[in-house]
């Protein structure tokens, strides 16, 4: 009888100790990104925002690159090089975005918010860059 009391007490202690722990977002299913409840959920949602913005950015980049490649094909020697200029500019912009967002992450360096801050920054900057590229498409 004494042993089952110890086992029951041990089980109760373990239950109380683990009651405050939440399951990872993946085990719970997808977080509600309209109203994320935990830091992990906020980070996941910021990552999704970045993925969405990055897809839009890549789509606009490819449209502009295709347009400029056609322009380069029909341009005279002095008018060629628009595609190379775009590639150079975009590579520099990506390096700037990543460095700028790493800097933004220092607001919570080493903390659980740091990845969210970086992803949010990348999402915002990528969205703005996609709009810039879209504007360029309209101008060419």
Image (cartoon, grey):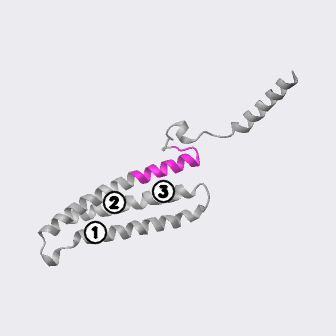
> Farthest residue in the bottom direction?
78
Query: Which residue does the image show at 54% across and 46% down from the upper left?
Result: 41
Of circles 2 and 1, which is in front? Answer: 1
What numbered label is drawn on residue 86? 1
Mark 2 or mark 3, whichever is nearer to me: 3
Q: Earlier in the sequence, mark 2 or mark 3?
A: 3
Between discs 3 and 1, the one toward the N terminus: 1
Q: What range of the chain is rendered magenta?
A: 35-51
Magenta stretch, main secondary structure, is: helix
Q: Quadrant of the N terminus?
A: top right
Q: How many circles with numbers are drawn on the protein?
A: 3
Residue 122 place in picture, x, y as percent: 44, 59
- Give the residue drawn at x 48%, y 44%: 34
Count neighbours of disc 3 (C-alpha within 10 A) and say few if under 14, some if 14 to 19, many if 20 or more: many
Query: Seen from this angle, which residue lies furthest right?
Result: 2
How many other residues sit within 10 Å of disc 1, few (<14), some (14-19) or many (≥20)? some
Between the C-alphas of marks 2 and 3, the distance is 16 Å
Q: Which residue is mark 2?
A: 130
Residue ID for mark 3: 119
Left-right relation of 55 to 36: left
Q: Can residue 13 be found in the magenta stretch?
A: no
């Amino acid at each position: 009888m004494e042993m089952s009391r110890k086992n029951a007490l041990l089980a109760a202690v373990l239950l109380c100790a683990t009651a405050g722990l939440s399951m990872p977002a993946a085990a719970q299913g997808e977080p509600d990104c309209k109203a994320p409840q935990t830091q992990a959920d906020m980070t996941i949602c910021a990552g999704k925002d970045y993925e969405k913005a990055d897809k839009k950015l890549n789509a606009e980049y490819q449209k502009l690159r295709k347009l400029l490649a056609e322009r380069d094909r029909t341009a005279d020697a002095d008018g060629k090089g628009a595609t190379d200029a775009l590639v150079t500019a975009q590579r520099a912009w990506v390096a700037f975005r990543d460095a700028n967002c790493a800097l933004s992450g220092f607001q919570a360096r080493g903390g659980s918010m740091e990845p969210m801050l970086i992803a949010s920054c990348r999402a915002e900057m990528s969205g703005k860059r996609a709009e810039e590229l879209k504007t360029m498409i309209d101008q060419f």
